[in-house]
Amino acid sequence: MTDEKKETVQKTVTKISEINLQFKNEVKKIPGGERMMLCFQCGTCTADCPIARFSDTYRPRQILRMAQLGLKDKVLSSDQLWLCAACYTCVDHCPQDVEISSVIRALKNMAVREGYMPSVFKELAGAIVETGLAYKIPELRLKRRLESGLPPLPKVDVESVARLFNRTNFAKLLEKGGDK
Amino acid sequence: MPNLKYAMFLGCSIPYRVASYEISSRKILQKLDIELVEMPDYNCCGLPLDPADHDVMLTLAARNLCLAEKEGLNIITLCPGCAGTLRKVNKLLKEDKHERERVNGFLKEAGLEYKGTIEVKHLMQALAEDVGLEKIKETVKKPLTNLSVAEHNGCHVVRPQKYIGFDDPEDPAILKSLIEVTGAKCLDYMDETECCGAPIVGVNDRISLALTRDKLSHMKDVKAQAVITVCPFCHMMFDTNQTRIERTFNETYGMPVLHYPQLLGLAMGFTPEELALKELRVDASKVVALI
């Protein structure tokens, strides 16, 4: 043997008690999550992922594998989920047509229901409830629009938007969201 | 041929912080005899909330589609995020009866019903497919032949291919041909089709800046004199955040970043003032000097 450094293999033990056997079926029921179990771990998604290139930890293939195994708590509480930029490169490249970023989005939706919601989404949602748009546009900007010859920004019927937030149960989700 | 007429869907980020894109777009669209009807009562396209809840995204997008259906007009939008979302949801609701019924159940609450009677196009797609390169060429008065630029498409204009069905995401050619109509040269560069990182600003700024920086350095390698974008978020990454990138990585780029309509506008003979070039964070006078 040469004096090459011996590679350290880090063994992660997954306890059977961490596994939720129904998790894969829950994911399959969410639009976009249907084909998760068809992932055969080729790694194309990670290889082609622009975020993975610059992150030491974000690996879409790993997220898929953990979800397939049923590591529900580990996946849903992971910060990694929120690093997907939804550039859809993996969707176009997946040989199994798994729609990786849609599976990850389905996992994010489940995470939110479990109370994990990054504050940035609470802010966006709050602005949409209040104004119909994702940002509260300051009066000064609205005035500047007119000064630069742009038409006035149409007003949103926020009550109608609020009714839709209630109807889709998103309003309730917002109330309890982000408490973890 | 009768004049083209669209419902203008502005979205959120353009009125919030990218007036120069809207100002220049309206200038070129007017020059091309395109009539815009301001879309009344529109709301956010829904995309920002897709990670939080898929149904709320579908419903917000569908509400916008219903509003345009009432006007009987196809939607034009300047933002790839809005275009991608509205196109995807429009296709889904047209093709999937079950989803249409489910979403219409939500919309009933706001007194609306999705019928599937309109189309949605991003500015670039409307220019390429509805106006056509020939007609655009006729409006070019000052060909920008001294200019070599790099394009940056914006992911949601082309991906995922099976839902968007516009251009080839692996070898995008349409923005290039729209650029070349102005007389400018459009350069190939490494990792041209890659994301700018904008969607994860606020989640992990370090990675998003590293992505844009990587693209900027590849553009600089091929001696691009400017970057041309068609997305308010990509523009923010390349233009607004460029000094932050220079500071973070201790490098100098000084790369002007123009919205495509500003480039076309210059070739049409509009002045830099009319196209709001002053509002760009990175000084674009180097580009103007080459005209």
Image: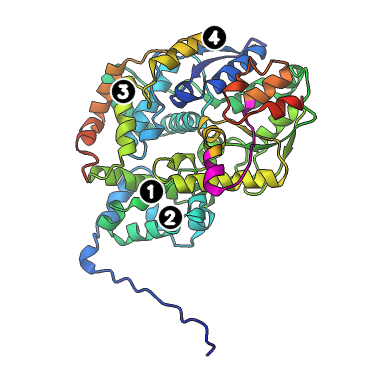
Q: Earlier in the sequence, mark 2 or mark 4?
A: 2
Q: Secondary structure at mark 4?
A: loop
Q: Are marks 3 and 2 in contact (CB under 8 Å)?
A: no
The residue that label 1 is drawn on is: A104
Q: Position of residue A138 (x, y in %)?
A: 39, 18
Q: Nearer the viewer, mark 1 or mark 3?
A: 1
Q: Nearer the viewer, mark 2 or mark 4?
A: 4
Q: Residue at x 52, y 31 (%)?
A: B80
Question: Against B51, is A152 above or below?
Answer: above
Q: Which residue is mark 2?
A: A60
Residue B14 visible at all: yes
Q: Which mark is residue A149?
A: 4
| Type of the residue with mark 2 | Pro
C-alpha distance separating marks 2 and 1: 8 Å
Is residue B250 one of those drawn in magenta?
yes
| Residue under label 3 | B107
Q: Secondary structure at mark 1?
A: helix
Chain to which the residue tagged by mark 3 belongs? B
Q: Earlier in the sequence, mark 2 or mark 1?
A: 2
State if disc 4 and disc 2 touch (CB < 8 Å).
no
- How many labels, in total? 4
Give the CA distance from mark 3 to mark 4: 35 Å
Question: Do residues under tags 1 and 3 come within 8 Å of each other at their CB atoms?
Answer: no
Q: Amino acid at mark 1?
A: Ile
Q: Are marks 1 and 3 on the same chain?
A: no
**Alpha carbon distance from label 2 to label 4:** 46 Å
Residue A131 in percent (x, y) is at 33, 20
- What is the three-letter code of the residue carrying label 4? Gly
Residue B273 against residue A30 in the figure, above or below:
above
Q: Identify the magenta region.
A: B244-260
Q: Secondary structure at mark 3?
A: helix
Describe residue B202's horizontal placement relative to residue B189 as left or right: left
